[in-house]
Image (cartoon, rainbow, N blue to C red):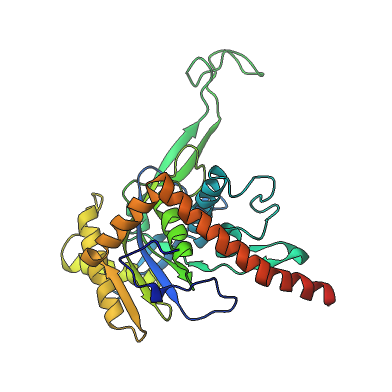
Amino acid sequence: MSFLKTVDAKLFHQEIPYKPMGKYVHFLTIRVTESYPLFQTDGELNKARVRAGVQDKTAISRISMFKRKQSTPERLVGRELLRNYGLMTAEECEYNVSFAMNNPDCIIYGFAIGDSGSEKSKVVVDTAFSITAFDESHETFTLNAPFENGTMASKGENGTKPGEVTSRINQQDHIRPQVFFPSIVTLKDPTEASFLYVFNNILRTRHYGAQTTRTGRVRNELLGVIFADGEITSNLRWTQAIYDQMKAQNTLHSLDPLDEDEVITAAVTAIESLMSKEFIVHTDFIGDTFTPLLNEVKALTGSEAGITAILQQADTEAKAYADKHMSKKKTGAKSK
């Protein structure tokens, strides 16, 4: 089944291959915070000391968005859709507990279940870094626990004296709204259905990081996709190239949030410059050439008939792959 008219079918496999075949598609994404998300480990925001740009050698600290902070929310959105359209149940496939091993989530994003089986992820996501420095990208909030009367003073319960101010106060660093994280999501050896499945997951995911029920709102702006016969530049180098571009255009504002249009313009210019220096075969859909593809994907995923057809095709391919190759793994494991 063919879905897309804007992309040459030769860029896709007809079925999911068992071994790497050297086809890659790279989704160029700018992740924009829209509330106060938390990307943290051991109670502290993740950050890294790196060079500000490729040309600008100044060392700065940047907030880091680790790969699992990106891939896990996206695959969970996909799993939610599979359940919603009756292609998977919570009983047969529970994330990080009991994988069914034969649905699009398991085959595309991978799994590991001890001796029962494993599948390497075909989606590659690396750590993303904020364009702006750590000091400009976060705020420290004081957290407290008010009583039912809406004040911080107790009414004498739980061993406290009436009117006594509670000491249940804590501080937590949060990432500010409108902080930008350039991120390249790579899908290895795509079929058309797996390409659309991952594409749709990126578009639909709205929350990242800790406490996703209360905060963590993040919007993904896709700037393009690149089909290639190899991997392309890293998130860090793309971020540094964007920084250099914005510095040259005098659009880095230390006190105010970056302008999104200026970020996108710099990001497109930076990735086009970086790709011009690559030594791989690639077909780029960036900027104006990406718009028709993006509109076509949105039209497909925005209708019940379209998203159902995509999910069913992805499920058919995943089950065919599992029947053909996962049974071999199980047989091989038993014979050892």
The quadrant of the rendering that contains the C terminus is bottom right
Looking at the image, can residue 115 be seen?
Answer: yes
Give the answer, above or below, for where 32 lies relative to 158: below
Q: Give me the residue at 25% from left, 60% from top.
A: 291
The quadrant of the rendering that contains the N terminus is bottom left
Within the image, what quadrant is residue 280 found in? bottom left
Outermost residue toward the right in this view: 335
Q: Is residue 14 left or right of residue 285?
A: right
Q: Give me the residue at 36% from left, 63% from top.
A: 4
Q: Give me the residue at 60% from left, 76% from top.
A: 18
Outermost residue toward the front in this view: 1
Give the answer, above or below, for where 143 lies relative to 118: above
Q: How far across and down, in percent of the image, does residue 332 sit?
A: 77, 76
The residue closer to the viewer here, 307 or 176, is 307
Q: How far across and down, in percent of the image, does residue 55 sit?
A: 26, 76
Q: Is residue 277 left or right of residue 111?
A: left
Q: How far across and down, in percent of the image, does residue 102 sit?
A: 64, 60
Looking at the image, can residue 68 be seen?
Answer: no
Q: Give me the residue at 66% from left, 18% from top.
A: 159
Instruction: Count numbered badges in the picture.
Output: 0
Within the image, what quadrant is residue 61 found in? bottom left
